[in-house]
Image (cartoon, helix red, strand yellow):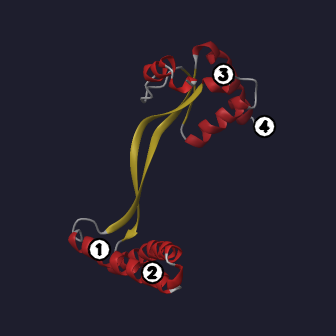
Amino acid sequence: MTEAFTQTRFSQQQARPQFPTPPTGWPIGSYDSYEKAQAAVDHLASTDFPIADVTIVGVQPMLVERIAGRMSWGKMLSSAAMSGAVFGLFLGLVLSLLNPGAGLLSIVIGLVAGVAFNLLFGALGYAANRNKRGFVSQSQLVAQRYDVLSQPRNAEKGRALLADLAARSAFGH
């Protein structure tokens, strides 16, 4: 019997559930953008600091929806046609691989069918929701600030390294 199927191995896997857990550690730095927090962790990584003890935590998350423009029939139809063409082309290529004797016909049929069905369903969906949403947007999850945490055994050293980084940045080095 191999080790993978022994009772001990099985019980060890069940004892460690892989559920999300809150972060642990002491704050050693706080930044107003993720890029600044990442730069701080990069600085720690360039020293002999035990980087496996570090966590970046986004505090006070917000869902930001950035409006890209108005939605119109033309934009909706062109977007639906493009995505339908990509899917139809993929489907046509797969069909042509499964039936080599069909030649380009299966690719053309897949392309036309993908565009037609996507246009139909896109138009029906847009017509049904026309009065509810007349714009295109992108959603993004951002935080108001980003804290860098370290395990307590290394927190003071991490604070000192990040304070040195902040001092050098303030003086332009």
> Tag 1, which secondary structure?
helix
Work out how far the residue at label 4 is from the one at label 1, CA to CA, in angstroms.
58 Å
> First in sequence: mark 4 or mark 1?
1
Check disc 2 and report the residue beneath it. 111
Q: Amino acid at mark 4?
A: His
Q: Name the residue carrying label 3.
A: 158
Of 114 and 73, the residue lying toward us: 114
- Specify few, some or many for label 1: CA neighbours under 10 Å numbering under 14, 14-19, or 20 or more: few
Q: Which mark is residue 5?
A: none
Quarter that holds the C terminus: top right
Residue depicted at x 52% and y 83%: 101
Residue picked out by circle 1: 121
Please tell me which of labels 2 and 1 falls first in the chain: 2
Left/right placement of residue 27 relative to residue 48 reads left
Where 52 sits versus 117, above or below?
Answer: above
* The one of 91 and 160 positioned closer to us in this rendering: 91
Q: Nearer the viewer, mark 3 or mark 4?
A: 3
Secondary element under disc 3, as helix, strand or loop, is: helix
Mark sitting earlier along the chain (3/4):
3
Type of amino acid under label 1:
Phe
